[in-house]
Image: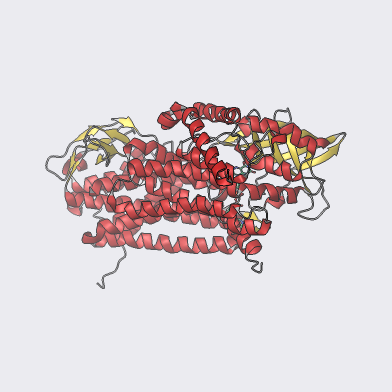
Amino acid sequence: MTATMLPTEVGQMSAVALAEIIERSIAGNPVADYAEREPLAWSVIEEGGWDSIAVAEEFDGGGANLRDLVEVAQVWGAASIPQPLLESIWAKRWSAQARERSGPISVSVPRLGVSDSSGLAPFAALAATGIARSIGAGTDRFDVAPLGSADTFTPALRPSVLPWTTKMEIEAARELGVIWAAEVVGAAQKLVDLSVAYAKTREQFGKPIGSFQAIKHRLADMHSQAQYAQTAVIWASLDPTNSQRACDYAVGTSISLAEQSIQVHGGMGFTWEMGLHYYLRTMLTRRELIVGLWA
Amino acid sequence: MTPLDNQQLFLDSAREWLKTSVPERWRQERGALSEDEIVEIRHEWDRQLFAGGYSGLAIPTMYGGQGMGLREEVLFHEAAAQAHAPEGIGRIGKILTVPTLVAHGSEEQRAKYIPGIMAGTEVWCQAFSEPGAGSDLANVAAFARKTEGGYLVTGQKIWTSFAQYAERAILLARTSHTDPRYRNLSFFLLDMKQPGITLRTIRQISDTSHFSEVFMDSAFVADSDRVGEEGEGWNIAMTTLTSERGGVEAITRYVEVRGDLDTLMRCCATSSDIDTEVKQLDTRLELVRWQVMKALDYVEEDLEFFRRTCMLKIMWSELWQEVTQLAVSLNCRAHQEHWRNQYLETRAVSIYSGSNEIQRNIIGDRVLGLPR
Ligand SMILES: Cc1cc2nc3c(=O)[nH]c(=O)nc-3n(C[C@H](O)[C@H](O)[C@H](O)COP(=O)(O)OP(=O)(O)OC[C@H]3O[C@@H](n4cnc5c(N)ncnc54)[C@H](O)[C@@H]3O)c2cc1C
């Protein structure tokens, strides 16, 4: 394998431009300020054509591939904006009916450990989200949210429990798992960045805590682990036969990074206001969704 | 009768008492109880313990305790764990205030405060940490200014657990602007129900609020409520902190982790894939208990005792975190809410009572004598 592992130009440019749009809408505010609001309206996303970046060029889309989406998903995950952008991008990539549809789209994924056929659907608690009945499996169709009963554990994902799950083409499901795992990795990298920044400014014993070797080594390990997690999702995007284990690794590592970021922040990390938990909650629910996809 | 027979007798009657005393609601529907109900049950449990004669087993009878030993305390907590007993809300009073007063308090202070703690009628909190004094506790800046008959304390505390339920606090405050670090602090017993005290509860990542910010604006403490002399606060606080990270604390935590691990083994972790992992956790948890029992033989020799107890806080906290990490990943629907909550709550156990990083520093410095 000698080919580059970089995303294509579409992926690179999309990631940069999306980061700018996000920055404009959240204006440097921490996730705790916007996770439970609507910092970025769906109309802005749709008008910018963001939900079409991975539609094939022959259908007038951006033509981004899965590796590109890994790049975009990390940017999205770092901000944790409560909109189903990634699900919509993916749906429009796989379904003609989704392409014709306006408004956000999401899916309902099997829940483990239940005896019924219920599913968990991210963003189904958001008004106007169309939840796909099937994707890439013939004639796709959608039910319009809000549906089911909201699960309030994960504010930034606004999930609901639905009585049914989305029928998905196997390859489509694999791609969605990779995209979600990449989103989680983006969130983990963000937490590493926040932890490093905190360790430079928080002082105890007259010094920044980052100068203590216990913290310095932990952060060095966190950096390494975040790198591995990122490599794992890139691997997952380029090597279908290993997608599943690479994604599981990436998500598990990311959750550990979130736990460690709380430790570095001390008591502050344990507060609702500091907001680290929003990312952690999203990661836990994404893990559940991804496991549901593989099942 | 041999001492062992005595202990067996004690244990038998404790088990009998627990069987009839642990509230059914707690045993059966703990997960469904509201925050207020939980607090009420925990409060009531303190009073039940006292009425049953199980409060302060290792505290001398002259202070309202049972005059037995640490060993009985440990045995009782084990039995309580097996009986899935609740944990009292008076833990700060029992685990921190009482040992501190026994070691450093005046006769008057012991007589005045220990009985209320034993009876479960007075809840205490620990007002040590401040925004600028977390790991670096000696950096406490709240100031106690001398006044007629006592002190007026002004400053801010943070992360004060149980503050909203507490009648009193053990308080660390500065009493000198000029004395050097470690000699400028004093230790006080603060009345929390006075006008100079305002609380602001802090919302935790688990979406509960068990701790608060405490704002003190000329709050009054009488001279008779200063423990030890002015300037001895740091040394006295070290007694408190050693108790906080010590054997009795570890055994009460053993009770809690045991409860969680039992739930995991009984219901959620049924897949054979994780059998080995669960057995490992179980072994390590039992080692917490055995480590405490081993240490009890050295309770009279400070350094030897500390050598054997200094790692307990790290042991139980990291173990508990691993238990909830595993549990929350298993998608057990019956316990989903419980594990989500416990998982988030246990993120704090490696931070509070002195972070695990600080505890490792202490082991390195004090036990191993490594150069600083
Ligand atoms: C749930 C909870 C309940 C609490 N209850 C109480 C209470 O009832 N009463 C009370 O007084 N306090 C209480 N605390 C406060 C607790 O003791 C402090 O949070 C703790 O001491 C850490 O201080 P900090 O939060 O300021 O973190 P910091 O001291 O800012 O630490 C941040 C990070 O830096 C690390 N660090 C700091 N210094 C060093 C060093 N020298 N070497 C290596 N690493 C270092 C820490 O380990 C941590 O990982 C509670 C905290 C929590 C989370």
- Residue A177, placed above or below residue B40: below
Please provide percent x and percent y for residue B271. Answer: 28, 48
Q: Nearer the viewer, residue A74 or B290?
A: B290
Report the residue at 57% width, 41% height from top. Answer: B6
Please provide percent x and percent y for residue B205. Answer: 49, 41
Indicate the colouring scheme.
secondary structure
Report the residue at 31% width, 55% height from top. Answer: A248
Q: Nearer the viewer, residue B355 or B312?
A: B312
Please provide percent x and percent y for residue A207. Answer: 65, 59
- Residue B101, placed above or below residue A255: above
Residue B217 visible within the image: no
Q: Quadrant of the C terminus of chain B?
A: bottom right
Report the residue at 55% width, 30% height from top. Answer: B45
Q: Nearer the viewer, residue B285 or B1?
A: B1
Report the residue at 46% width, 49% height from top. Answer: B321
- Residue B204, placed above or below residue A242: above
Kindly give the residue lying farthest to the left in the view shown. A138
Kindly give the residue lying farthest to the bottom in the view shown. A2
Residue B186 visible within the image: yes
Kindly give the residue lying farthest to the right in the view shown. B148
Kindly give the residue lying farthest to the front in the view shown. B1
**In this figure, what is the number of numbered marks?**
0
Q: Quadrant of the N terminus of chain B?
A: top right
Please provide percent x and percent y for residue B142. Answer: 74, 43
